[in-house]
Image (cartoon, helix red, strand yellow):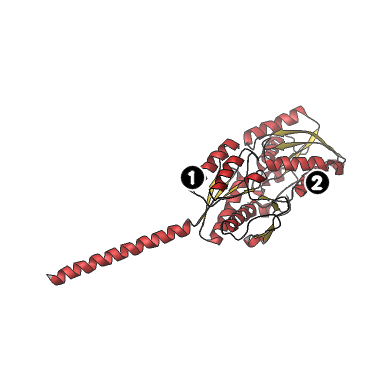
Amino acid sequence: MSIKWEDESMKLAKKLAIGVAFAVAMMAGTASAADIKIGLVVKSLGNGFFDAANKGAQEAAKELGGVEVIYTGPTTTTAEGQIEVINSLIAQGVSAIAVSANDPDALVPALKKATQRGIKVISWDSGVAPEGRILQLNPSSNELIGKMCLTLVKDHLDGGKGDFAILSATTTSTNQNIWIDQMKKQLKDFPGLNLVTTVYGDDLSDKSYREAEGLLKANPNIKVIVAPTTVGVLAASKVVEDKGLVGKVYVTGLGLPSEMAGAIKSGATKEFAIWNPIDLGYSATQIAYRLVKGETDGKPGSEIEAGRMGKIKVGDNGEAAMADPFVYNATNIDQFSKVF
């Protein structure tokens, strides 16, 4: 009777020990997985550029270990939608928020609230006002992007002269507006180019298509549409193809190789440019992680380790640039369209 009781007692003790060990292991695993949570907030979901950026962010998280990237954003390109998303991330207790903003100013109050809760905030791709973030990660130098867009327009025109128009995202998109301003400032260096007008497709495929269609109908002398947005450049290329204008009107700007391969092959565009969005998401995640870990304060003049991207330096204006734009054309489109 005593032996049986001792056997049962030992069995119970073993079960309890195993249970406790399992619970501890589970808690440790959970703590490790949720060590650092980074909210990657994009302008809108369902955008190929941001899907590619998320791929890079997930690569960085895996490489760093103990990092969870929460890829999120509104369904439409509105500041209101992003504010809801940011408030949700604050409620979840994330460690950092990295946002590509639909509006530079409207997000500031929500981001300030995040900062007050101890959350590290950066913007990337499309910036927020300085008072709403620690730093802004630009995909490239704004001056170089503006110059690249004008160079692409020139290269699509006979003799480098003619009328062109801009098809942008939203009227409040920080990055597109900066690049358009740079194009206008640098027009003096491209005397053969004449900017007719700028229209906005709100980074929506159907609206961008309609805007490009209306643009060409109202301005038959336009020979090139330049779109500093992946949604816009793809939509405008489709208009040129659908209207039988290949060879008469060209489209160029900033696009994803995977989406623009058809436009290159159809002749709707000869070449376009973009940095690697995978690298951009990767870099934003690396920077957010270093800020959370206290390895950097992100202040002007600081250099931040960014894994395979090396060190990224923060400029005097609180902004950092990742890399120069890269040109894609018929010679390399097949190679890169399989990547992103």
263 left or right of 72 in image: right
Is residue 158 visible in the rendered image? The answer is yes
**Viewer-proximal residue, 286 or 250?**
286
Residue at point 65%, 45% (across, down): 131
| Residue at the extreme front of the image, as rendered | 116
Residue 311 % position (x, y): 67, 61
Residue 219 % position (x, y): 78, 29
Type of amino acid at the residue the image marks with label 2? Thr
Residue 333 % position (x, y): 69, 51
277 left or right of 215 in image: left
Are dots 1 and 2 in contact, CB under 8 Å? no
Reading the image, the residue beneath label 1 is 91
Reading the image, the residue beneath label 2 is 151
**Viewer-proximal residue, 118 or 168?**
118
| Residue at the extreme left of the image, as rendered | 1
| Residue at the extreme bottom of the image, as rendered | 3
Q: Residue 200 lies in what quarter of the image?
A: top right
Of the image marks 1 and 2, the number of the one nearer the N terminus: 1
Type of amino acid at the residue the image marks with label 1? Ala
> Of discs 1 and 2, which sits in the foreground?
1
Circle 1 SS class: helix
Is residue 78 visible in the rendered image? The answer is no
**Viewer-proximal residue, 181 or 151?**
181
Q: Relative to 242, is 297 above or below?
A: below
Residue 287 % position (x, y): 62, 56
Label 1: few (<14), some (14–19) or many (≥20) C-alpha neighbours in 10 Å: few
